[in-house]
Image (tube, rainbow, N blue to C red):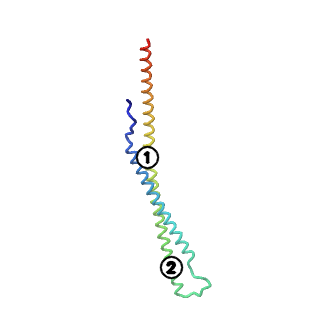
Amino acid sequence: MVKKFKYRLERVLQYRAILRSEKKKELMLKNAALKEAEDKLAKLEEAERTTGLEETEIIESDKIHLAGDFALGIRRAILKQRDAVAELEKVVEIAKQDYIEASKDEESLQMLKSKKLKEYHAYLNKEEGKFLDELSVQGHKRGK
């Protein structure tokens, strides 16, 4: 009786698949955080463009002072948000590289499994051929 094919690294392959899945989830979460930060930056930049005093309005010194403070606050928030976006872009890039590495690890083990399975099938075919040859030889001996 021929033994059933058993891939010795099956548990490692399963672990790598789980690891790849986790890295993919991390990458998706970090991409979502980056998108959120970029949206916030876009809103701040839009607020900076749309704030200001109406041209037809009589300008009071208090309003000028408030508008200046507001513009300065938005400018600081924009700079801070740009830094946050840049940092998140780096984090996303690292997560992307981790995911790619995990994918390659899993894929290499999967390819090795396929290769071993082909070798196993070739071995089975060879053994089956030997068995059939032996049967035909025994049949000839009985026939004589």
Q: Give the number of the disc on residue 77.
A: none
Image depth: mark 1 or mark 2 in front: 1
User: What amino acid is at disc 2?
Assistant: Phe
Instruction: Look at the image and tell me in which quarter the N terminus lies.
Output: top left
Assign a secondary structure to mark 1.
Answer: helix
Q: Mark 1 highlights which residue?
A: 106
User: What amino acid is at disc 1?
Assistant: Glu
Q: Residue at x 41, y 50 (%)?
A: 18
Residue lying at the far top in this picture: please name it: 144
Of 85 and 144, the residue lying toward us: 144
Q: Residue at x 39, y 42 (%)?
A: 10
Of 77 and 13, the residue lying toward us: 13
How far apart are labels 1 and 2 at the CA level? 53 Å
Which numbered disc, 1 or 2, marks the residue that appears first in the sequence? 2
Q: Position of residue 21 (x, y in %)?
A: 43, 52
Q: Residue at x 44, y 15 (%)?
A: 140
Q: Is residue 56 above or below residue 24?
A: below
Q: Is residue 41 left or right of residue 55?
A: left
Answer few, some or many: residues within 10 Å of disc 2's Cα (few below 14, many 20 plus, some between 14 and 19): some
Q: Give the number of the disc on residue 70.
A: 2
Assign a secondary structure to mark 2.
Answer: helix
Q: Is residue 16 above or below residue 134?
A: below
Answer few, some or many: residues within 10 Å of disc 1's Cα (few below 14, many 20 plus, some between 14 and 19): many
Q: Is residue 108 left or right of residue 47?
A: left
Q: Position of residue 125 (x, y in %)?
A: 45, 29
Q: Position of residue 49 (x, y in %)?
A: 57, 74
Q: Residue at x 43, y 20 (%)?
A: 135
Of 17 and 105, the residue lying toward us: 17
Instruction: Look at the image and tell me in which quarter the C terminus lies.
Output: top left
Q: Position of residue 105 (x, y in %)?
A: 43, 46
Q: Is residue 51 left or right of residue 118?
A: right
